[in-house]
Amino acid sequence: MRKIDAAAARLQSSRALFQCPLCRETMEIEEFSFVCARGHRFDLSKNGYLNLLPHADQSMYSKALFNSREKVSRAGFFDPLLDRITEEILRQVNGPDGLRILDAGCGEGSHLMGILQRMERLRAEDDPFKDAGPTVAVGIDISKEGIHQAASQASSMIWCVADLAALPLKPEQFDVVLNILSPANYDEFNRILKKNGILIKVVPENDYLQEIRRAVYEPSDRPPYLNDPVVRGFCSGMQNCRQERLAYQVSPDPIFLDNILKMTPLTAQQDIEAIREKLLADHKTITAAFRILVGEKKQAESE
Ligand SMILES: [Zn+2]
């Protein structure tokens, strides 16, 4: 089956989740297009993703950056983080009705793919998860480059280019929204979450990639990165917020280090080779440190 046929079939069975990004009308599949009741039309790409952005957006992230992030992910850099998120999802939502999950700001999709693989593995092995219903997974990013790459690799999900500030999704449809190392829009996340839905957001801890920060910026009086404002924003955007720190060390080889340097905006316009040599000389390990934030959908105060 061609990718575009599989994507059209998948979209057909999940079309009720979507609304037109221009007028919020219901969407229907017409051959390889998604068309709203007022006639706004969005075509599926050849490799099966949907571009629901009304206007072309100049993304700041390049194809090369997404390639690097995918390689870093494949090398296992995010594995402990993805294990933890998967656990959290299955602990929260594991009913026979199935699970609808949105990765908002999915980039090239490695995190969402990694999490779904883990869920499948656990469901195959573990009794408590055996009766869980089917999973519908949607990955959205404003970057066409990122979504193109995601759709080229994994086709069991629905991939869309769209704006997080105006999600092309109907209200109260999702059990879980993921927002991993990406900007948030809490009004939109709350709107599309089901009543008992949760948002799982990951932000870098202040010591995330600290060895790279030091190699790039020292000696300089640039203020250190602090995640406090983002954490405060999360806690006022959602309710019953919990948070935890997850930190571990990785020992990168030169190729891995090369990709990690290309992945992070820290090193833009820097001499990557020189930084890599300095890092290899000074450090045996690199710090991966994340804050995992879990919050429930904010219930309307007037109710
Ligand atoms: Zn429309």
Image (spheres, helix red, strand yellow):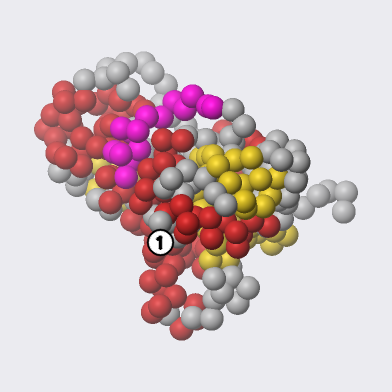
- Kind of residue indicated by mark 1: Met
What residue is shown at x 40% (from left), y 78% (from top)? Answer: 124
Please indicate whether residue 175 sits to the left or right of residue 207 in the image.
right
Instruction: Look at mark 1 in the image and give the residue it sits on.
Output: 1
Magenta residue check for 110 = no
Q: Is residue 202 above or below residue 273?
A: below
16 or 278: nearer the viewer? 16
Q: Is residue 159 above or below residue 142?
A: below
Most extreme residue toward the bottom is: 127
What residue is shown at x 68% (from left), y 50% (from top)? Answer: 27
Counting from the top left corner in percent of width and height, residue 244 is at 49, 53
What residue is shown at x 32% (from left), y 45% (from top)? Answer: 70
Binning the other alpha carbons within 10 Å of mark 1 as few (below 14), some (14 to 19) or many (20 upward) gives few
Please indicate whether residue 7 sits to the left or right of residue 171 in the image.
left
Q: Is residue 142 above or below residue 29?
A: above
Which quadrant: the C terminus? bottom right
Q: Secondary structure at mark 1?
A: loop
Q: Does any portion of residue 192 appear in the rendered image?
A: no
Which contiguous range is marked in magenta?
A: 56-70
Q: Does any portion of residue 301 appear in the rendered image?
A: yes
Which quadrant: the N terminus? bottom left
